[in-house]
Amino acid sequence: MTAKAKVAILISGQGSNMAALLYHARLADCPYEIALVASNNAHAPGLKLAEAEGIPIFVRPHKGMDRAAHDRIMDEAIRGAGAEYVALAGYMRILGDDFVAGWQDRMLNIHPSLLPRYRGLDTHKRAIEAGDTHAGCSVHLVTGELDDGPVLGQMQVATLPEDTPEKLATRVRYAEYQLYPRILAEYVGREMDVGWIEAQVNRLALALPETHFRPSHGSPGWRVGSEKSGKYFAHFSAHHHGSDAIGVLVKTGSIDELETLCEEQPEIYWKPAYYGASGWIGVRLNRANVDWDHVAEWLERSWRSVAPKRLTKLMDAAEEF
Ligand code: GAR
């Protein structure tokens, strides 16, 4: 069974979205689990529920602390709990740039409007006053700008003539409970998806000079050089010979290096059948927290080992800058 992605939820209040996320995590096929619920408000009702449900909690009121110091303490608690993603669920505190940068592409937020409309507060009142036929909610990745960042999913909610901000907020929350768990599950699940993983390898491999895609024995592969006489520097391997690994095969310097890596970091490296004998190593990519820069380095190294000299020279010259 593949390990589930660990998520920390940050709340400041009721925590009803937190509840939706955590009950969704109980479904057998949910790809995430809740590692921590953290709050800046010791009286947030959601904390009691999380505790009763056996989820570790962490509380640190921000009063009297500067933003960076408070962010740091929250960040330590989240990482200490082993979380790989952060889900903001009514966390009513602006996060500093360092915190946001540390969770780039790994922090999601739910906002009660159809972004880019109505960033900030009083979203329902503003939607009613504008006479919108539909309000709604959005799940987005968190960037340095408030309620900005790529939208991952939205759900519309019809407004009614007799709506007050409170009535509308209640219905928007029903939509939030459907949307947030689904989008979070899809987002963390994509890292285990073979198509997504292959697309990342493809992007990195084709970013190297004079490369092209060419399947080999029915599996994706990447070559350097001309279409006619190019050489393979990477092969894609998905569940080969019944293994649960999905990853990329790249060239090591020697069988010794290959054996040592496989022995010391078996969670990352494996010796592939057949290819292993000629120095190709498997780098496992269906795991949480893959370091894609590291994968890019492996691809470049493998590329260098078979690329024509004129290309590696060009690369050396470019890297001197
Ligand atoms: C939710 O409606 C959420 O969209 C909103 O706060 C509420 C929290 O309720 N978030 C924001 O306004 C963030 N800008 P909950 O604590 O019951 O989940």
Image (tube, grey):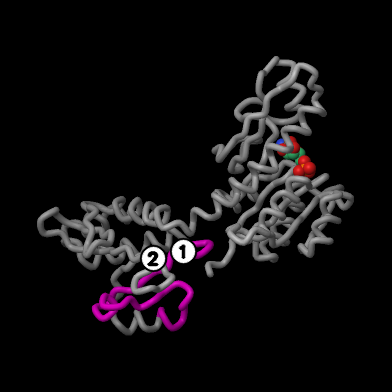
The residue positioned 25% from the left and 64% from the top of the image is 233
Does the image show residue 64? Answer: no
Q: Please indicate, yes or no, whether residue 181 appears anywhere in the rendered image.
A: yes
For the residue labelled by badge 1, is the local secondary structure a helix, a strand or a loop?
loop
Q: Is residue 148 above or below residue 303?
A: above
Q: Residue at x 20, y 58 (%)?
A: 224
Q: Which mark is residue 286?
A: 1
Which quadrant contains ligand 1?
Answer: top right
Answer left or right for 12 relative to 181.
right
Which disc number belongs to residue 133? none
Q: Which residue is mark 2?
A: 247
Describe residue 88's horizontal placement relative to residue 274 as left or right.
right
Q: Quadrant of residue 213?
A: bottom left
- Kind of residue indicated by mark 2: Gly
Numbered-mark total: 2
- Amino acid marked by disc 1: Asn
Let me know if residue 7 is in the magenta part. no
**Was residue 263 drawn as part of the magenta stretch in this picture?**
yes
How far from the left and from the top, in percent, is residue 59?
82, 56
How far, Cα to Cα, is label 1 from label 2?
7 Å
Which of the two labelled residues, at mark 1 and mark 2, occupies the earlier sequence position?
Answer: 2
Q: Secondary structure at mark 2?
A: strand
The residue at the far right in this view is: 43
Mark 1, other Cα within 10 Å: few <14 / some 14–19 / many ≥20: many
The structure residue drawn at horizontal position 67% and vertical position 18%, both measured from the top left corner, is 132
Packing grade of label 2 (10 A; few <14, some 14-19, many >=20) is many
Task: Give the quadrant of residue 81.
Answer: bottom right
Q: Which residues are magenta?
A: 261-290
- x, y percent for residue 7: 65, 57
